[in-house]
Amino acid sequence: MTLPKVYVTRRIQDSGMKLLDGRVEYEVWEEDRPVERSELLRKAAAADGLLATLSDRIDDELLSLCPGLKVVSNYAVGYDNIDVRAATDRGVVVTNTPDVLTAATADIAFTLMLASARRLVEGNEFLRSGEWVTWQPNLLLGADVSGAVLGIYGMGKIGQAVARRARGFDMEILYVNRSPREEAERELGARRVAFEELLARSDFISIHCPLSDETRGLFNESTLRSMKKTAYLINTSRGPVVDQRALYRACSEGWIAGAGLDVFDIEPVPLDEPLLTLKNVTTIPHLGSATVRTRESMARLAVENLLAALEGRRPSAVVNPEVLDGR
């Protein structure tokens, strides 16, 4: 029996890789950098399945070269790297890895909130540079998180997980979402508000929305100027949701107090990015889901989704179910 051919664009955890053995014929891009575009196009053209990451652009050009492709399994919850409409038009199933990274991503969002407010990176650098000579009453004073107002843009599972953490800090929780989250309102005291009120009242705004035409550049000069001068912007969703040039001005000119960023327009972020020069901007390299347990769970789910689609079963996390429903 001929096994399906799979191309894996980055070696993932063994908890997922070992599930492929004996069930598919696969190749892996072994380098710690994104697979070269020409190589991806060449390998995808001969594949029945792709196991991709956010670094891989799965667009109409690629899909048009892949007559035998049945599934693209994304090793992520987001899938803005994939042209889902083009995949759907060609009958290609797209899957992702929701739920398993909710807690880890919520943890990193709250970490950025605390680190930004209490100036942890500044404090670490201050100590290690030898500048700390004595305790001082006004040394590196930060902002209170406990009792502050948290605005959550996007009250999906990750947004709600952040809200649960905020309750432990006695924060008032405001949120913007397309539809009400009645359970979160009952259990957490969260209140759905207009975007304008979220901007005007929040001491911290944490972004948890997918990247779309509607959300691209949503946090721009106009919206950033509508925030409190003492507020912090936290982004663990997708970089392009925030206009980085406007954010640089906001943080350098004092429109807002600062920001905590896990994601950027271009990743890895260029070292000449102006935001990296600012002490009131805390930055980390897209670590939202980066725990051992979470990445192992993502690996298993991504491979299970891939195998299910190749073996004629319904994957547990399908982005475009209409492909399966129409078969």
Image (cartoon, helix red, strand yellow):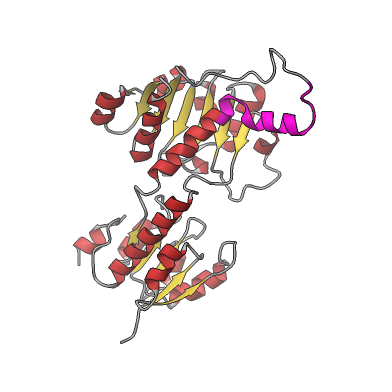
The residue at 19%/61% (across/down) is: 325
Q: Residue 17 in the image: state x and y as whole percent.
A: 43, 68
Q: Is residue 276 magenta?
A: no
> Which quarter of the picture shows residue 87?
bottom left
Displayed quadrant of residue 2: bottom left
Q: Please, is residue 181 above or below residue 290 in the view?
A: above
Quarter of the image where the C terminus is located: bottom left
Rendered residue at 39%/75% (across/down): 21
Q: Residue furthest top?
A: 137
- Magenta extent: 115-133
Image quarter where the N terminus lies is bottom left
Asked whether residue 121 is drawn in magenta, I would say yes
Q: Nearer the viewer, residue 12 or 154?
A: 12
Can residue 60 be seen at all in this image of the molecule?
no
Viewer-closest of 57 and 21: 21
- Which secondary structure is most common in the magenta stretch? helix
User: Extreme front residue here?
Assistant: 134
Name the residue at 57% across, 25% down: 117
The residue sitting at 79% across, 22% down in the picture is 133
Q: Is residue 250 left or right of residue 211?
A: right
Rendered position, 169 above or below 50: above
The image position of residue 162, as x and y in percent, is 40, 33
Q: Picture coordinates of residue 249 (x, y %)?
A: 63, 28
Whether residue 281 sits left or right of residue 316 in the image: it is: right
> Residue 126 location in percent, x, y?
73, 29
Q: Nearer the viewer, residue 1 or 61?
A: 1
In the rendered image, is residue 277 in sight? yes
